[in-house]
Image (spheres, rainbow, N blue to C red):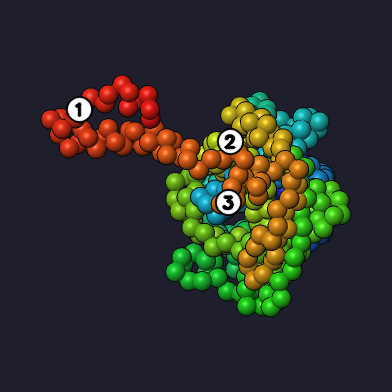
C-alpha cells in the first residue's frame, strides 16, 4: 500500500548501494515513477556505469549533467573570495556542493512534472539538512522523501538482502572501509578505522595526494594570478575555473598539500572525525589570503575575517539560499575589487610557502615600510599618538590607584598632548 499519493520522484543518484536500493524501495512503497539525477561535480570514476545501474534498479530515466564549471565559478570561487574555513581547518568541500546539486534537482523536478524529490542521506549526518533546506527554499511545494528516516534498513547487510529479495544485481566491487564524498574541490574520508580519533589515518586511505613521506624532496614553484579575487591563471597561462582547480589538484597532490585530519562539530549536534584532501583548494586559499594582505586595508581585512567565520557556518549548516548568505556575498564582492595580482608559492612536503607577492593595487610600499627616513612618516609623531591611544589605560590605572591620587589634568597639558 502506498504511503502517500506521489506520482513522480526525482532522486539524487550516486549509483552506490544506498541509492540502488532506494530506487526499487520508492517504487514499492510510493508506487511512483522514479527519475534518477546525477550531477557531475568532479566525482571522476565514480560516474562510470550509472545508466545501466539506474535502469536495472527500475528508474524510468537517468539524467546526468556536467556541472563542474558552474560549481567552480559560482560556488567554489565565492568560497575563495570569502576566505571561509569551518573550524579553522575544513575548506567546506562537501558542504558547498550540496546546494548546486539540490538546485538542479529541483529544477529538473519542475521540468519533468515531478511532485517529489528524494535523497540518500542518513538521518545522522549534515547532508540531509543541506539538501532539504535547499529544496524548501527553492520549491516548498515538492514533497521530500528521505528513505533512511523511513525504512527498516539499518546496515549494509540489510541493504544487500533487500536487493537479493527483489532479484536485483548486487554491487560488483568490494565496499571501501570508509564513507567517501568526492568532487572537484576535495575528497572526504569518514567511518571505519577513522572512528577511533586516537588512531592516525593509514597511507592507503589517500586518493588525491601522496603520503607526506612520499612527496618529492625538491620543492616546486608556481605562480597563481588573480583578478578581483578570482583565480584566473597558473604560471601565466589562463584556465577556466574548473580546469584551474583540476590542474592545482594534480600539483598539490604530488606534494602532499591539503591533507587535514579533523574532529568537527556537526550541525546535528555530535562530533565526527574525518580526513579531507583538498590539494588545489588549499593552494588557492593560501595564495588568495596572501594577495589580500597587500591589497586590503587593515579595517576591511580584519572585519572580513570575522564575517568569513559566519559565512563558513552558513555554508556548513546548509543555508546557502538564505538572504544573509547572499548579502555577505555582496560584501565580499565589494572587498575583492582591488584583489588583483599574482602570488608565487613553493610547494614542498605538505607546505604552501609564499615566495613572492605582486599587485598593481598593493598598499605595501618599501619606501613607507623602511626603518630609515620616510617622507610620509615622521618618527616623532608617534609620541603623541601613543599618549592618546594609551589614554584609557592611563585613566584606568589612575582610578585603580585610588581616587585620592586622581588629579585633574591641566587644560594646557591636554592641548599639548
Q: Is residue 198 left or right of residue 18?
A: left
Residue located 81% across and 51% down the image: 233
Label 3, label 2: how far apart the Cα atoms are: 28 Å
Give the foreground label among 3 and 2. 3
Label 2, label 1: how far apart the Cα atoms are: 40 Å
Give the foreground label among 1 and 3. 3
Secondary structure type for disc 3: loop
Neighbor class of circle 1 (other Cα within 10 Å; few <14, some 14-19, many 20+) is few
The residue at which mark 2 appears reads as 300
Q: Position of residue 326 (x, y in %)?
A: 64, 30
The single residue placed furthest to the top in the displayed view is 411
The residue at which mark 1 appears reads as 407
What is the number of the mark on residue 269?
Answer: none
Kindly tell me whether residue 61 is visible in this rendering: yes
Give the foreground label among 2 and 1. 1
Residue located 68% across and 75% down the image: 215
**In which quarter of the view is residue 360 placed?**
top right
The residue at which mark 3 appears reads as 372
The single residue placed furthest to the right in the displayed view is 237
Look at the picture and state if 84 lies above or below 281: above
Look at the picture and state if 234 lies above or below 149: below
Q: Toward the viewer: 408 or 209?
A: 408
The first of marks 1 and 3 along the sequence is 3
Q: Is residue 256 left or right of residue 312?
A: right
Q: Mark 1–mark 3 contact, CB under 8 Å?
A: no
**In which quarter of the view is residue 173 placed?**
bottom right
Residue located 38% across and 27% down the image: 416
Kindly tell me whether residue 134 is visible in this rendering: no
Amino acid at each position: 500500500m502506498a504511503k502517500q499519493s506521489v506520482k513522480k520522484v526525482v532522486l539524487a543518484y550516486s549509483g552506490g548501494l544506498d541509492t540502488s536500493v532506494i530506487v526499487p524501495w520508492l517504487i514499492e512503497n510510493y508506487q511512483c515513477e522514479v527519475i534518477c539525477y546525477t550531477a557531475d561535480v568532479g566525482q571522476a570514476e565514480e560516474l562510470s556505469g550509472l545508466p545501466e545501474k539506474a535502469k536495472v534498479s527500475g528508474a524510468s530515466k537517468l539524467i546526468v549533467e556536467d556541472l563542474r564549471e558552474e560549481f567552480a565559478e559560482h560556488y567554489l570561487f565565492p568560497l575563495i573570495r570569502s576566505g571561509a574555513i569551518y573550524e579553522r581547518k575544513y575548506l567546506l568541500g562537501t558542504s558547498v556542493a550540496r546546494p548546486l546539486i539540490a538546485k538542479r534537482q529541483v529544477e529538473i523536478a519542475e521540468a519533468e512534472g515531478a511532485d517529489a524529490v528524494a535523497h540518500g542521506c542518513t538521518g545522522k549526518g549534515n547532508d540531509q539538512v543541506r539538501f532539504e533546506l535547499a529544496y524548501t527554499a527553492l520549491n516548498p511545494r515538492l514533497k521530500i522523501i528521505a528513505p533512511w528516516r523511513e525504512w527498516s534498513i539499518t546496515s549494509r547487510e540489510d541493504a544487500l538482502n533487500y536487493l537479493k529479495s527483489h532479484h536485483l544485481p548486487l554491487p560488483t566491487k568490494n565496499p571501501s572501509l570508509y564513507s567517501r564524498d568526492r568532487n572537484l574541490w576535495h575528497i572526504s574520508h569518514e567511518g571505519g578505522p577513522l572512528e577511533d580519533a586516537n588512531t592516525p589515518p593509514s597511507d592507503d586511505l589517500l586518493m588525491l595526494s601522496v603520503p607526506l613521506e612520499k612527496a618529492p624532496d625538491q620543492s616546486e614553484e608556481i605562480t597563481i594570478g588573480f583578478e578581483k579575487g578570482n583565480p584566473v591563471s597558473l604560471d601565466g597561462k589562463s584556465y577556466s575555473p574548473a580546469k584551474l582547480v583540476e590542474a592545482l589538484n594534480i600539483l598539490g597532490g604530488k606534494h602532499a598539500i591539503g591533507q587535514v585530519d579533523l574532529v568537527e562539530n556537526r550541525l546535528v549536534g555530535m562530533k565526527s572525525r574525518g580526513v579531507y584532501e583538498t590539494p588545489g583548494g588549499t593552494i588557492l586559499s593560501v595564495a588568495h589570503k596572501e594577495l589580500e594582505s597587500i591589497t586590503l586595508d587593515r579595517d576591511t581585512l580584519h572585519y572580513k575575517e570575522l564575517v568569513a567565520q559566519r559565512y563558513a557556518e552558513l555554508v556548513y549548516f546548509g543555508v546557502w539560499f538564505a538572504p544573509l548568505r547572499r548579502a555577505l556575498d555582496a560584501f565580499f564582492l565589494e572587498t575583492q575589487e582591488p584583489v588583483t595580482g599574482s602570488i608565487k608559492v613553493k610547494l614542498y612536503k605538505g607546505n604552501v610557502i609564499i615566495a613572492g607577492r605582486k599587485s598593481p593595487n598593493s598598499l605595501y610600499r618599501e619606501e613607507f615600510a623602511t626603518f630609515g627616513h620616510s617622507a610620509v612618516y615622521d618618527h616623532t609623531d608617534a609620541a603623541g599618538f601613543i599618549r592618546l591611544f594609551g589614554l584609557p589605560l592611563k585613566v584606568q590605572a589612575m582610578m585603580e590607584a585610588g581616587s585620592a591620587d586622581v588629579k585633574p589634568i591641566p587644560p594646557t597639558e591636554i592641548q599639548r598632548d
